[in-house]
Image (cartoon, rainbow, N blue to C red):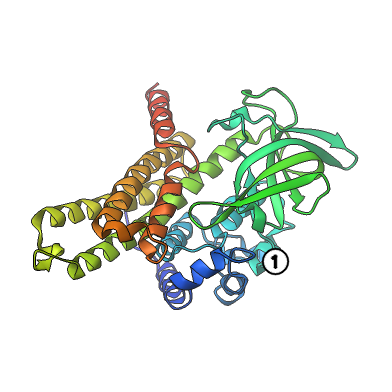
Amino acid sequence: MDFDLTEEQTLLKATLAQYLAQRAGFAERTAASRSEPGYRTTMWQDLAQTLGLLGATLPESAGGLGGGAVEQMIIMEELGRALLLEPVPETVFHGAWLLERCGAHDLLAGVVDGSVRLAVALGEPEMRHDYADIATRAAPAGSGWALTGSKAVVMAAPWATHLIVAARTSGQPGDADGLSLFSLDANSDGLTLHPYPTIDGRRAADVLLDGAIATLIGAEGGALALIEEMRDRAIAGQAAEAAGLLATLVKDTVEYTKQRQQFGQAISGFQVLQHRMVDMHMQVEMVRSAAVLATLKLDGDPVERALAASAAKVTLANACRFVGQNAVQLHGGMGMTDELAIGHYFKRATVLESEFGSADWHLARHAALAVKRAA
């Protein structure tokens, strides 16, 4: 199998890496995170209009570049390396992907030019990781649907111009059938956001839906498989992000150990610490390999796709914990201060551990899928 990037993909990677190295500095990120709106609007417009990044994986009919899963992997690895705040995955790889698959193309042009930002509202206070347990209800209301229920920890919701919401048009929580997807304006009546900062410097919100009128996208009652596929794609993107993020943690840690003196010499000369940093590097390579496998399986058999995604999630969760904790420890007490980037990378790694399902849940899912495949 050929793992080499095409000329266009290599150019995408190099261009994005150069831009982020010049414009996405740590100090600017910290300042933007602590101010309003919580992300850099000028950078968002640059990503859309200067780089054309927001349309990289969207169809040419919507003004995009027609890329696919490999382009997502390339972009997410560079975003992880730069610890980017802006809601690229939520808008492009989660929300816009769902809109495209549902045939709801009216917002895609806005995604490409940066005027539309999306958040996908799936999780609820009374559920864990099984999307069949979604209980939010949708009932016909004139030409639209009235949504009633609540959503928890909707990432990037405070920045979104539109939400994509999963709700039940029939059945009960736990049923595989009856889930549908809806889009609605973030300023709709009956929609209330309770925003808050997350530990990694981004923003999320709990969402209350009290009769908010939304538009059905896709087929009524058959959204569960699509939502689960979106999660697998999101995990493949997370694995790529983790590869970039953890590579930066390792690089910065190695550089720091060359400067820190103990017993009259740099601690990088201590063999036990050299072994530890090699173990950290090996974890990064495992995550990168898992990201490649998950990416290459995205457009294939659903069971194989899900197996690769769950394997990638377990791999990245373990690596984020190991690399993150060791990077902080090797930096000493400075590792968790706000002044150093290392602590901020560690906090993002901690979020990646649990978003879209814990390692334990994905281990159980992988085991069940392996039995299904064998049968």
Q: Is residue 19 above or below residue 341?
A: below
Q: Across the whole image, how many numbered discs are drawn on residues?
A: 1
Q: Is residue 363 left or right of residue 57?
A: left
Residue shown at the point (40%, 73%) measured from the top left: 14
| Nearer to me, 97 or 322 | 322
Q: Is residue 263 left or right of residue 295?
A: left
| Nearer to me, 180 or 326 | 326
Mark 1: amino acid = Ser
Mark 1 secondary-structure assignment: loop
Residue 359 seen in this snapshot = yes
Percent coordinates x, y for residue 54 in the rendering: 58, 65
Percent coordinates x, y for residue 275 in the rendering: 14, 53
Res 126 → quadrant? top right
Res 11 → quadrant? bottom left
Question: Which image quarter is the C terminus in?
Answer: top left
Q: Is residue 115 above or below residue 232?
A: below
Q: Which residue is mark 1?
A: 115
Percent coordinates x, y for residue 201 in the rendering: 51, 58
| Nearer to me, 281 or 338 | 338
Residue 3 seen in this snapshot = no
Q: Is residue 92 left or right of residue 240?
A: right
Percent coordinates x, y for residue 159 in the rendering: 65, 58
| Nearer to me, 50 or 65 | 50
How crowded pointer 1 is (Cα within 10 Å; few <14, some 14-19, many 20+) is rated as some
Q: Is residue 64 above or below residue 364?
A: below
